[in-house]
Image: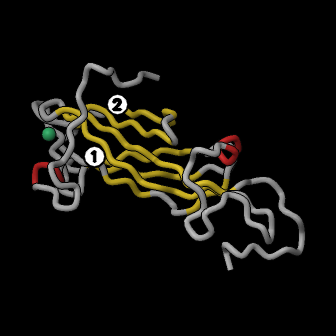
Amino acid sequence: MTMIGNEEKINKPADPANLTEGEKKHVPVIEAPEMVIAGRPFEVAVTVGSIPHVMEEKHFIEWVELYLHNKLVGRKELDPSGEKVATVIFEVEADEALIAIKEIETCRVRGVNICGSCGEKSVIANLRAVEKCNVHGIWEEYKKIEIMSGEEREEGKKCVWKA
Ligand SMILES: [Fe+2]
């Protein structure tokens, strides 16, 4: 798979909380489960953008890439179809090894990445979607998802995170 070149600058919205109409047409929208299990595939839909971008010969979204914790997990080349919505569905699987990475932000409830009651492990990792418009360049968006360990837990102990 191809990585984006460093020479290409990523556009940043002036105010991410108040996107302009032009920015809304280019900042990708990521739809993903809030919580996934490591080792089990899940779907991520990336749409450009919250206001549909045109997909015409002279002006279209060339490609969409998806990263999970900085690793490229999918790339799709798009054609100018005349259809107004550029949506790409990626099938993604989180690696169990991600759970052990200490630098990743930990549980949003307890602030640790191992539950003391049931032994459940999780991390919160970033999904990053990147897209390129042939006229307006490269844009990106992030979404945090919680990845729960897929390994067997001790039977009979209740996970307080999910209670
Ligand atoms: Fe554009």
Question: In this view of the protein, which residue sits in the foreground, 122 or 58?
Answer: 122
**Which residue is at 17% across, 55% downward?**
15
Marker disc for residue 77:
2
Query: What element does badge 2 sit on?
Result: strand
**Which residue is at 37% across, 43% downward?**
129
Kind of residue sitting beneath label 2: Glu
The spot of residue 108 in percent (x, y) is 55, 65
Dividing the picture into quadrants, the one containing residue 61 is top left
Q: Residues within 10 Å of mark 1 (few under 14, many from 20)?
A: many
Marker disc for residue 86:
1
CB of residue at label 2: within 8 Å of ligand 1?
no
Kind of residue sitting beneath label 1: Ala
Figure coloring: secondary structure
Tell me if 94 is positioned left or right of 34 in this view: right
Query: What element does badge 1 sit on?
Result: strand
Q: Is residue 123 above or below residue 70?
A: below
**Which residue is at 26% across, 31% downward?**
62
Q: Is residue 100 above or below residue 2?
A: below
Residue at the far bottom in the pictured view: 163
The spot of residue 117 in percent (x, y) is 79, 71
